[in-house]
Amino acid sequence: MNQAQQTNITRRGWLRTALRTIALVGLGGVMVGMVSRTKRLCTKVSSTCRGCAKREACGFAPPRTLWQLDPTKCIQCGLCATSCVLEHSAVRCFHTHAQCGYCKLCFGYFEPGAKALSSAAENQLCPTGAIRRTYIEDPYFEIAIDKALCIGCGKCVHGCKMFGNGSLYLQIDHSICLNCNECAIATACPADAFSRVPYAEAYTKRANGSSEA
Amino acid sequence: MNRKLTAALIIAIAISVSTLLVVNKRGCSTTSVPESYLYSTKVYTDAERSAPLLYREISRIPLSLLEPHALTIGQNGTIAVVGDKALLLMDSEGREKQRINLDSPPTCIAWTSTNIFVGFNTHIEVYNAAGNRLQTWQTLGENAWLTGLAANTNTLFAADYGQRIVWQFGFDGQLLGKFNGRGPQGSEPGFVIPSPYFDLAIHNESVWITNPGRQRLEAYSFAGKRLSYWGKASTEIDGFCGCCNPSYIAITADGGFVTSEKGMPRVKRYASDGAFLGMVAPSDTFPKGTVGLDLAADNDGIILVLDPGSRAIRFYAEEAL
């Protein structure tokens, strides 16, 4: 029986099957490639690695450029929080303490029309409660960003930029960012605030540095 | 049969790939932003609408400056404006009479009967009405950042945002004194100024100084003793919101106050006791993002607003006039 079946396979038939198989495998490969590119999920470090959060440990050379957003162009539209391929966006709020006014009535912290200048949840502007407010001395309060909670929506940045002095601003956190070849947030950004910057200038230079909680 | 299956499979794959490409290009459906992520100014605009509008804009003079910073009124209604690296002298109709080029960007200006004082970040220069430079005073330190000037008959007061103090000079440039608003025992926090908006104006025997971090105006004697204050932090229209308001002030002939704000760029009118009277110009009349609405009030009750967003001086008169 087996011998009979083997003899039924013609050379033309075998070639046709082989070609179909190669074509299907090729198309499948293209599709898988597109899916992985869309999800921006780093699979394995390879010789073509463009760098990721683990690049320092893996031993490969750092990327020549990184994605970063320009705070002067940012309009705090909220898309940074929702457009990143990561479930928890790689964009975070940064805070330059040296620039901060330590305002009692901080518009990066309090909801417009807050009934009291207290830390009660209903008075807080941040949708995730990522800003910590600490009393220093009358009338000064210090705020700090909890990076684990910050989602990069920029709501506090808007309030600070509009009413304060702009000590709060958004940046891509490169300890989280996958540095995708095509950044999904950059694609969605209506202000064209994203661009690739040299690795040595990964973060916006602020006169006196920045810090987070 | 096989051919049909293969063709169908290829078409399905092609459609899938195309869909993926399109979705990818548009950033997928994750581009919608929840309402809770967006900053709303509705509470402020609603408060503005509830307030009476007391003034109307009667004219507007365009300026030949890219970044106008400050204005003042001289004698006979003449107007002086500084910005870029220039001092503009205009007649009462707003016609530019003279343009004086300056060495560095000016930040503030005051005009007495004899002299025009132009403030820069760290020093003051004195000009006469013809536009000739008479004096250049010594620097006030590398941390100085002058943002406001006001003068009476023999004394010039200069608000220094950089060092959070008010300087007091004779017209010859001699330093007469300075004060920081902390009181003799240092019991007060002094001038709380988170951003470079620190203005002052003189009325009778006192100098009124903005304390924007405390959302109020404070009156000091010429010796630097605090006499009184008014103003409160509030999102209601009678208070000041933001960490840096009021940003500029002017005092009218009747002793009342005109204030301008940043964040919500608007101009308001207060009585001499600080009671809110109404709006001069609501925020929707200025270009979005406008900051630095310097003010002046003439003896006829006309309020001059320097609008950097429109690069113009805007004149407002009371509705009844």
Image (cartoon, helix red, strand yellow):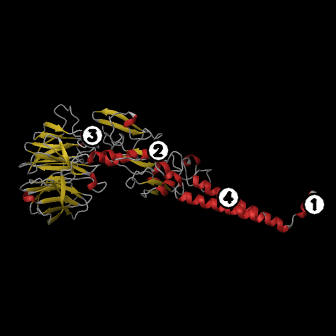
Residue neighbourhood size for the residue with mark 4, other residues' Cα within 10 Å, grouped as few (<14), some (14–19), many (≥20): few
Mark 3 crowdedness (10 Å alpha carbons): few <14, some 14-19, many ≥20: some
Q: Is the C-beta separation of discs 2 and 1 under 8 Å?
A: no
> B181 or B13, which lies in front?
B13
Give, as a three-letter code, the residue at label 4.
Gly
Residue tagged by mark 3?
A: B234
Q: Chain of mark 3?
A: B
Residue placed under numbered mark 4 in the picture: A29
Contact (CB < 8 A) between labels 2 and 3? no
**What's the residue at 27%, 56% (across, down)?**
B286
Label 3 amino acid?
Answer: Ser
For marks 2 and 3, give the CA distance.
29 Å
Q: CA distance from mark 2 to mark 4?
A: 34 Å
Say yes or no: labels 3 and 1 on the same chain: no
Q: Amino acid at mark 1?
A: Ala
User: Which of the two residues, B313 or B58, is positioned nearer the viewer here?
Assistant: B58
Callout 4: SS: helix
Assign a secondary structure to mark 2.
loop
Q: Earlier in the sequence, mark 2 or mark 1?
A: 1
Tag nearer the camera, 3 or 1: 3
User: B115 or B209, which lies in front?
Assistant: B209
For label 2, the residue is A151
